[in-house]
Image (cartoon, rainbow, N blue to C red):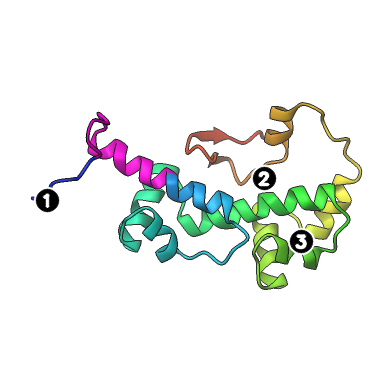
Amino acid sequence: MLATVLPVGTGMTAQEAANRRLLRARDLMDRRYAEPLDVPAVAAAAHLSPAHFSREFRRVFGEAPGRYLQRRRVERAMFLLRSTGRPVTDVCRDVGFESLGTFSRSFAEIVGCSPSAFRARQSEVPVPASGPFMMRWGRPAAGPARHSSSGEAEVASSA
């Protein structure tokens, strides 16, 4: 049996150390979402093999790493579409998508409408002022139940 090497004096269990590595990888995706990232590169940041990283990431955060990165990019695109007048093609490239078709398809799958329709719809909605409410309000709702970026299950409103 292989022994798990833990930092001396941390008092962390092996599971806590593994979760910390996964958080480090997720933070990397949050910071560098616009860069070309793939599972092997992010898994290397977590010091795990790509297959083990993918399994553990899904177990801990409730979605595959690629899907998490895709959703993160779409969340950022939603912000840019609401707050800037930049063309959709520029927003697509700014958030890390290489293809406008892939961006539009992913955006519509996650948000429920095209980027252009989202922008048009948002111009009619007043923007709330509260920071935490703004963050929640600006998140895409995907289906009846989904996981937040913290990995906790949330229930989407059915209104």
Q: Are marks 2 and 1 in contact (CB under 8 Å)?
A: no
Residue 158, picture quadrant:
top right
**Residue with the most extreme top position:** 130
Residue 93, picture quadrant:
bottom right
At mark 1, the secondary structure is loop
**Residue at x-position 47% and y-position 55%:** 65
Point out the stretch of residues depicted in magenta: 7-23
Q: Are marks 1 and 3 in contact (CB under 8 Å)?
A: no
Residue tagged by mark 3? 91
Alpha carbon distance from label 2 to label 3: 17 Å
Image quadrant for the C terminus? top right
Crowdedness of circle 3 by 10 Å Cα count: few (<14), some, many (20+)? many
Residue tagged by mark 2? 140
Residue 86 drawn at (x, y percent) = 85, 59
User: Does 46 sit above or below residue 97?
Assistant: above
Residue tagged by mark 1? 2
At mark 3, the secondary structure is helix
User: Does 155 sit above or below residue 31?
Assistant: above
Alpha carbon distance from label 2 to label 1: 42 Å
